[in-house]
Image: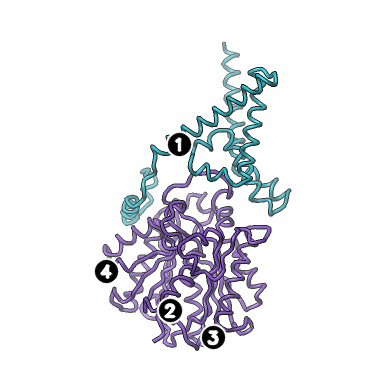
Chain colours: A cyan, B purple
Amino acid sequence: MADEKKKNLTLSQQKYQELAKRHEPPRPLVRNFTRAFLVGGGICLVGQAIQEIFIRYFHFTEKTAGNPTVAVLIFISALLTGLGLYDRIAQWAGAGTSVPVTGFANSITSAALDHRSEGFVLGVGGNMFKLAGSVIVFGVASAFIVGLIKTLIKMGG
Amino acid sequence: MRQGYQSWVFPSRPVIAGTSAIGGPFEAQGPLADDFDILHGHLMIGQDSWEKAERVLLEEACDKAIEKAGLRKEQIHFMLAGDLMNQTISASFSARTLAIPFLGIFGACSTSMEGLALAAQLVDSGSADYVLAATSSHNAAAEKQYRYPTEYGSQKPPTAQWTVTGAGAAVVANKGTGLRIQAATIGRIVDMGMSDPFNMGGAMAPAALATIETHFRDLQLPHDHYDLIVTGDLGKVGHSILSELLPQHNVHVPLERYVDCGMLIYGDNPTVWSGGSGCGCSATVTYGHLMRRMKEGEWNRILVVATGALLSPISYQQKESIPCIAHAVAIEADK
């Protein structure tokens, strides 16, 4: 526990938290890492295969095949979410399914599904980015800053 | 009548005239399936939202408990109910359907015993002849409100718990036969600074300890007085913590007589992590499973300690710790 956090606790609270910690079953880290590696890698492998198909059979270049490949992965992810399977796979795979683009698609689809009962505008529209929103905000903001730094360095150079 | 600091004894020993337990599809696969009055095959229960589905559960629980008490709803003087939804909509909307004078209560997962204790008090004081106490929770509705979208793929830690889809109700009466309510202890908020919403058992265990300790002190009972002490939804993690805390605090309850509803409802199923939770957990297990076994004569005296974690999604995001509470009700066979 961080010392900062500990400072605000009384002695009995600290003692209790140490006791409670002992009763927590440890997170199976090795198992989680292995599964995340396998599933995350597997998703990337599938993505690579899809990309190859686009290049070989649909005359895309390596550069232009990226977008349709991502679209296919997003579609599969959204479909699995809608069928109620994605969260089960994710409980098994952990970060393996949440880090790739499929996890992003799942966060949007699942929020949209959950809030369908509140209508299309206030429910689906208003809530579908409730998890993905922060990814977009910080993604765009950090891309802007990185772009700015890159431009400044170029100007200097 | 108050005894000690925060306990009530009920000289008239109000009768639990009828109880009910309603469950969802996952509960139907659990080891206690036979103890439910109605089990539903789908989480939606033919409704178009999780929230409406929960309301149906609660309404069915109320109807069934009144029916099993051999009463009509017009005879019920007051209804006390609560749930986990924002503004306790499941309870209020069910009360709208039932049209019984209504007091909404909120004690998170401790609502079951909060309601039962208050119902007993109303009956014992002569304020009512029949009082209905009910509560409900719905797995998907609770996940949606408290955590992530239901279909969102996030991996939960082994300390997490599974919110029960279910509702339980009890009719407390001033006469008749059945199990009787002997006493109740109203809990104080205990906050040990725990802030992980995926470890509610760990957060709530000290609240259960405080209430159990106070109950024995207030009523001056020997620690082996009860044939069974059951906590609401501490799960495996909280159960193991409390089993260590009780002897440490000189509460020498025979530990083989201590069980937890959250561990009973799904048995050893590893997919529920630490166990069941939610208002429906202690309510369905107590009103269904435990009451049946008491009526069969297995136990004469039990103490039900329903535990509640009084957090909200906002308090958690603002990095607040989790205030917890536990209410205990002593139920005895009619002798």
Q: In the rendered structure, which amino acid carries the disc numbered 4?
A: His
Q: Is residue B214 above or below residue A115?
A: below
Q: Residues within 10 Å of mark 3 (few under 14, many from 20)?
A: few
| 3D distance between C-alphas at marks 3 and 4 | 37 Å
> Quadrant of the image for the N terminus of chain B?
bottom left
| SS category of the residue bearing label 3 | loop
Q: CA distance from mark 4 to mark 2?
A: 27 Å
Q: Chain of mark 3?
A: B
Look at label 3 and name its amino acid: Ser
Check the residue under mark 4 and report the chain it is in: B
Which residue shows up at 47% across the image and 35% down it?
A: A36
Between the residue at mark 1 and the residue at mark 3, the CA separation in whole angstroms equals 60 Å
Q: Amino acid at mark 2?
A: Lys
Looking at the rendered image, the disc whose residue lies closer to the viewer, 1 or 3, is 1
**Residue A35: mark in rendering:** 1
Residue A25 visible in image: yes
Numbered disc 1: secondary structure: helix
Would you name the residue on which mark 3 appears? B127
Identify the residue position indicated by label 2 in the image: B295
Please state which of residues A151 and A77 is positioned toward the viewer in this rendering: A77
